[in-house]
Image (tube, rainbow, N blue to C red):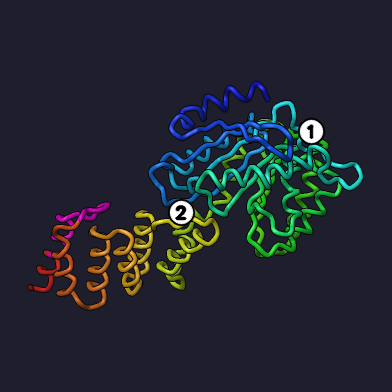
Amino acid sequence: MKRLLPVLGAIFLPLLCLAQIKYENISSEKLGESRQIKIQLPRNYEENTDKTYPVLLVLDGDYLFEPVAGMVDYYSYWEDIPEMIVVGVNQDGIRMEDTKYSKQDFLPVDKGAKFFEFLGMELLAHIDQKYRTGNFKIIMGHDFTSNFINYYLLKENPIFRGYINLSPDLAPGMADHIVNSLSKSETRSWYYMATSDEDIPTLKKAILAFNNQLKGIDNKNLHYKFEEFENTSHYTLVGKAIPSAIADIFSIYRPISQKDFNETLLQTSISPTQFLTEKYQSIEDLYGVRKKIRLNDFLAVYQAIEKTRNWEEFKPLYKMAFDNFPGTMLGTFFEARYEEETGNPKRAMRIYQNAYGQQKIAFIDTDFMLAKADAIKKDFGY
């Protein structure tokens, strides 16, 4: 593990320099001591004063925080995931005490019980009070701490919606408890688990058996993903699992993919604009993030309409474009295409001409719009 840290640090340090990293000591009444935490705020946190952010809580923050924070900053830069507040809890030398459970009922006991309350009642309350947090929260752990994060699932109203389990060292009976909880969950939950071909044999055996149980859960509210990485150890699997887990939890958030385009938008039975509307409504409903529709997603829907010749879809699309990109030529172009393909070429010509003075966007500029108007004038002799 110690050999892995310099490599991960070299990869992610340049990214972390751009984000805001804070170090705090939290005085805990539950623990009777202070605990050090690391916090990464999004790049433009101070400027976006009205924006709230999902929270990713990382246990074993002494070695997991940097790779997690780096990947969150990288993925959010490319808009594959939302910007998040990443919180790491340092546990170097005390993780076994923090994750202690009873040998009788296998639930947190002694320092483990106090640490459980510290995270859920003190640390998250501190983060919520001090920073602009949203309701969507994820927790991550590795082996012993991975087992520990699952205790929050056993609560009646879990405070976390996503659970990232990196080679969990499960307590006796924990698998059955988790399966029972996830089977009955009435709220949308994300559960990720990873192992590797070179993982610790006893852990891997239990994880594979647990995976078979989880695969059998029939609950539409559960999104579950399992991965077994090749040529990786108990420690190096972390480097592959972190980006995969984060990307999977936020799969709905990412831009329209080529697969979405080919398998969904090009199907004539599908309304491309309805797909676009529902995608962004789901982002808000699931993650608590209100996001402006991306320009590339508008252009993907535009291309789908052109290919399927479903011209009526331009009408809702141009209204959405006016709302999301006011003052630009985007909505004007879509409106003109609607009129042009639904039997109103003269009106389309005038709309193209009216784009003069509006802001260019993507490939749509004044020359492009006037050329479209001139083509209509030439074809119809106006």
Residue 338 painted magenta: no
Secondary element type, mark 1: helix
Count of numbered badges drawn on the protein: 2
Q: Residue 257 carries which label?
A: 2
Spatial distance from mark 2 to mark 1, Cα to Cα? 45 Å
Q: What x and y, as percent, mark residue 243?
A: 57, 41
Task: Tell me the residue at 64%/29% (across/down).
Answer: 62
The numbered disc on residue 172 is none
Q: Which residue is drawn at 58% across and 39% down?
A: 87
- Tell whether position 369 is magenta: yes
Q: Position of residue 111 (x, y in %)?
A: 79, 37
Residue 332 makes an appearance in the image: yes
Q: Residues within 10 Å of mark 1 (few under 14, many from 20)?
A: some
Which numbered disc covers residue 97?
A: 1
Q: What kind of element bears circle 2?
A: loop
Which percent across, then down, holds residue 247?
A: 55, 47
Side of 134 where 123 appears, left or right: right
In the depicted structure, whether residue 155 falls above or below residue 23: below
Side of 104 relative to 170 (left or right): right
Name, please, the residue furthest toward the bottom: 343
Q: Residue 291: give x, y in percent of width and height.
A: 43, 56
Nearer the observer, disc 2 or disc 1? Answer: 1
User: Observer-nearest residue: 194 or 145?
Assistant: 145
Query: Does label 2 or label 1 sit earlier along the sequence?
Result: 1
Q: What residue type is labelled 2?
A: Ser
Query: Which residues, given as a range, are shown in magenta?
Result: 359-373
Q: Quadrant of the N terminus?
A: top right
> Which corner quadrant of the image does residue 357 belong to?
bottom left
Residue type, label 1: Glu
The residue nearer to you, when weighing 290 against 35, is 35
Q: Is the C terminus in the top left, top right, bottom left or bottom right quadrant?
A: bottom left
Using the rendered view, name the quadrant where residue 305 is placed. Answer: bottom left
